[in-house]
Amino acid sequence: MDFQKEFPLNDDILYMNHAAVSPWPKRTQQAVQNFATQNATVGSKHYLQWLETEQSLRNKLASLVDAQSADEIALLKSTSEGLSTIAYGLDWQSGDEIIISNEEFPSNRIVWQSLANQGVKVIEVDLKGDHVVNIERAISTKTRLIAISSIQYASGRVINLEALGKLCQQHNVLFCIDAIQSLGVMPFSAQSCNADFVVADGHKWMMGPEGLALFYCRKEIQHTLKLNQFGWHMVADAGNFDNHDWTIADSAKRFECGSPNMLGAHALNASLSLILEVGIDTIFSLTQQLHTYLRTQLTSAGFEILSPKEDFCGITTFKTNTENHKDLYQKLMANNVICAPRGGGIRFSPSFYQDKETVDKAIHMVKKLL
Ligand SMILES: Cc1ncc(COP(=O)(O)O)c(C=O)c1O
């Protein structure tokens, strides 16, 4: 497969921003166009087929996170919504503690801090050094949950999820992973890391649109989350509108109260079909190779790599000699180098289908604009 041909990006766009919002593959563009045509010409005539696409998406997501089955997957609208479903589904006691890191994206900090009025305390652990040891030190008898991003959004630090999962088991602590920066670019297994919850919107490395997120909830603990949203779609007998007796679905569908985001499902299903076709191991290895090259070139251009030297994936953040990286970022964007100002520098996050030439051109533009 010619990977670049799968992405109809304009030639003059140097896309270094998959860790923010990914461009869509061609097949995703086509899936959305086809869905729009169907809606405009025959409405919901093919609704049964749409449901098949939606189920196919659940199966793909189950495979990508290595769930036991698609019954552990709910489709929500964002990572933040998934995290809120957990935070406001668990039954907290005053004095309970939640461990997060001091590098989290606000979605995985604010929601836990919002539980302060229930007496819940959030402990932010510094990840520098051996992050597993640092987190273990913070665990106490009051710890109820560890919530962490699989890859930190600004630095690209990759978290040792298997080790943390073991710690959680040993200390009887729930394990919640914000996997938005790794699903679609790095192998992931909810089962191997003993995750209780995994959340991730589809618009980064899964290469789908914003507004449709994976919410994985381990089967055995689904019933322990109190539900805060109710509707026709989350019940066992969802299609039977005349039935006034209802029970909650015995699967993660219990977290989906109403009509699905069918447009988003068609788009994300198409994007994931590409990812699964290429294979996550291939994507990971090509992305690593590209970032290794990027880092070498940035270093020889005299820039300082702020991201960890080892255990990285998908994200390379670097500092130049400018005092003002926000200003540099704006100039880069104006010159079609799509990137982000993060972690005190510029974050480049190219993906598997791009080549060294694209990386060279982006670095050349950085040098030119300084
Ligand atoms: C680690 C992490 N979590 C969550 C999000 C986004 O959350 P949401 O899907 O709620 O918009 C981002 C976006 O940059 C992120 O980097």
Image: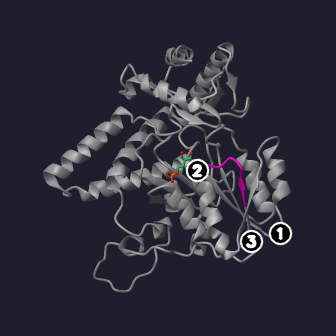
Tell me if mark 2 has few (under 14), some (14-19) or many (20+) residues whose alpha carbon lies within 10 angstroms of its own: some
Could you tell me the amino acid type at mark 1? Answer: Thr
Q: Which residues are magenta?
A: 99-105
Q: Secondary structure at mark 3?
A: loop
Q: Report the residue at 57% width, 61% height from top.
A: 83
Could you tell me the amino acid type at mark 3? Answer: Asp
**Nearest to N terminus: mark 2 or mark 3:** 2
- Residue at label 3? 96
Q: Secondary structure at mark 2?
A: loop
- Rendered position, 153 above or below 118: above
- Residue at label 1? 141
Q: Is residue 347 magenta?
A: no
Q: How is the image coloured?
A: one colour
Q: Secondary structure at mark 1?
A: loop
Q: Are marks 1 and 2 in contact (CB under 8 Å)?
A: no
Q: Is mark 1 within 8 Å of ligand 1?
A: no
Residue 110 found in image quarter? bottom right
Q: Quadrant of the N terminus?
A: top left
**Residue lying farthest to the bottom in this orientation:** 245
- Report whether 22 appears left or right of 356: left
Give the foreground label among 3 and 1.
Answer: 3
Tell me if mark 3 has few (under 14), some (14-19) or many (20+) residues whose alpha carbon lies within 10 angstroms of its own: some
- Rendered position, 262 above or below 144: above
The reply to whether residue 348 is visible in this rendering is no
Distance of label 1 from label 2 (alpha carbons): 30 Å
